[in-house]
Image (cartoon, helix red, strand yellow):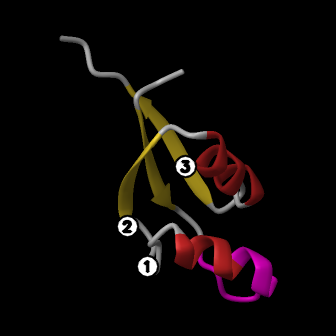
Amino acid sequence: MADMLKITMVKSMIGRPEKHRKVLRSLGLTKINKTVQYADTPSIRGMVHKVSHLVKAEEITNEA
């Protein structure tokens, strides 16, 4: 597993079900092309999976 996930919103939430909108808002994604970073946890992975058609997720590893 990666250390961090970089999540970018690539499609609008207009016309999407309320569940999808709540997931995007809880991730901190409110506008297209906004990017957030979170620790790679199962709960964050599950949220990304729910809205995978609206976001792009990249794994970031810390190589020291």
Task: Name the residue tied to disc 1.
Answer: 31
Q: From the top left corner, tell me how far across and down residue 52 is, in percent.
A: 70, 53
Residue at horizontal 65 percent and vertical 40 percent from the top:
42
| Residue type (three-letter) at the residue carrying disc 2 | Lys
| Cα–Cα gap, marks 2 and 3 | 11 Å
Judged left or right of residue 7, residue 23 is right
| Residue type (three-letter) at the residue carrying disc 3 | Lys
Say which label, 2 or 3, has the lower sequence index.
2
Task: Name the residue tied to disc 2.
Answer: 34
Q: Main secondary structure of the magenta part?
A: loop
Q: Which quadrant is the C terminus positioned in?
A: top left
Q: Give the number of the disc on residue 56.
A: 3
Whether 29 is among the magenta residues is no
Residue at horizontal 71 percent and vertical 49 percent from the top:
46
Residue at horizontal 37 percent and vertical 67 percent from the top:
34
Q: Is residue 16 visible?
A: no
| Residue type (three-letter) at the residue carrying disc 1 | Lys
Span shown in magenta? 12-20
